Image (spheres, rainbow, N blue to C red):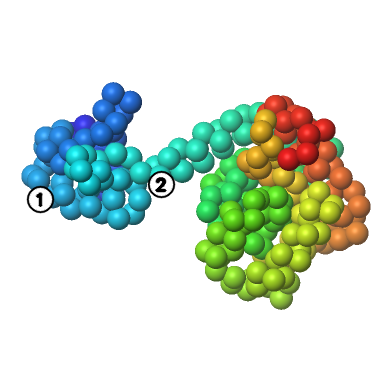
Amino acid sequence: MQLSSLHPSYHIESLARGLAVLSEFSEEKPTLSLTDVAHRLQLNKTTTLRLLSTLESLGYLERDRQTKLYRPGLEVLRLGFVVLNALEVRQVAAPYLRQLVNEVEETVNLAVLDNSEMVYIDRIGSKHLVNVYRPVGSRLPAYCTSTGKAILAFLPAEQLEAVLNTSTWERYTEHTITTPEALHENLALVRQRGFADSDGEMIPELRDVSAPIRQHDGQIVAAVNISVPSHRVSYEKLISELGSKVVDTGRKISEALGYNVKRVP
């Protein structure tokens, strides 16, 4: 990949060079030396070493201390899994999201966990004039969203603690959960009911419920969500009616991904 061919608007040269380095690794060339990368990108070795060292410090590259060869690190692998899982889940879930919107006539979202944030990968809005808008690609904290809590409640303890340790615990409204202790208590309720709710935790005028989605091996890969303006749906209706509907949709998507609902994860 020649850097001279990259001329988009608002071009950031250092970022382009870093991505160009990562692009040189492939199935045929899983490891590269400093000389290899410098030659492929037509850069001097000093510049190349700075790029490689930066990517290594961020976890995107690893360097074998004996051979001095570089290979993609765990951060690259993590990003790859996020993308692949999101694409598969979004494709499989699409017809079930449309069905859910038709049933409840409210906005439906699909989200995945990335570190301590929820990334919204699909959305179908309702036909109401007053609608809940959250564009695809939006990121929100997991600890104070129902999508996040629907996933966190069923994570292995070690993974859950890792998320909690990197959470900001910012208070967005008077209802926002701001401590690990309070969240653990809330997650126990999520596990008991099978779905999570949020009543103005992130946005005062917003209520929503979410249920987890499992893949074939029982691992939680996403959450399906129904979002409503608080003036249109009472909290009682949110829990008694929409809660069961979002759980049913989560189950259907999980089954479509190969999960056996009779199996205990």
What is the secondary structure assignment of the residue under circle 2? helix
> Image quarter for residue 172?
bottom right
- Left or right side of 20 for 257: right
Residue 219 visible? The answer is: yes
> Label 2 is placed on what type of residue?
Glu
Q: Which x, y percent locates residue 111?
A: 63, 45
> Image quarter for residue 57?
bottom left
In the image, residue 23 sits, relative to residue 225, either above or below, namely above
Q: Which x, y percent locates residue 234?
A: 88, 60
In the image, residue 178 sits, relative to residue 250, either above or below, namely below
> Label 1 is placed on what type of residue?
Thr
Looking at the image, which residue is at 58% across and 54% down?
Answer: 159
What is the secondary structure assignment of the residue under circle 1? helix
Whichever of callouts 1 and 2 sits on the residue coming sooner in the sequence is: 1
Instruction: Return the residue found at the far top.
Output: 28
In the image, residue 147 sits, relative to residue 4, either above or below, namely below
- Left or right side of 123 for 14: left
Q: From the image, tell me which residue sits under label 2.
A: 75
Q: From the image, tell me which residue sits under label 1.
A: 46
Say which quadrant the N terminus sits in.
Answer: top left
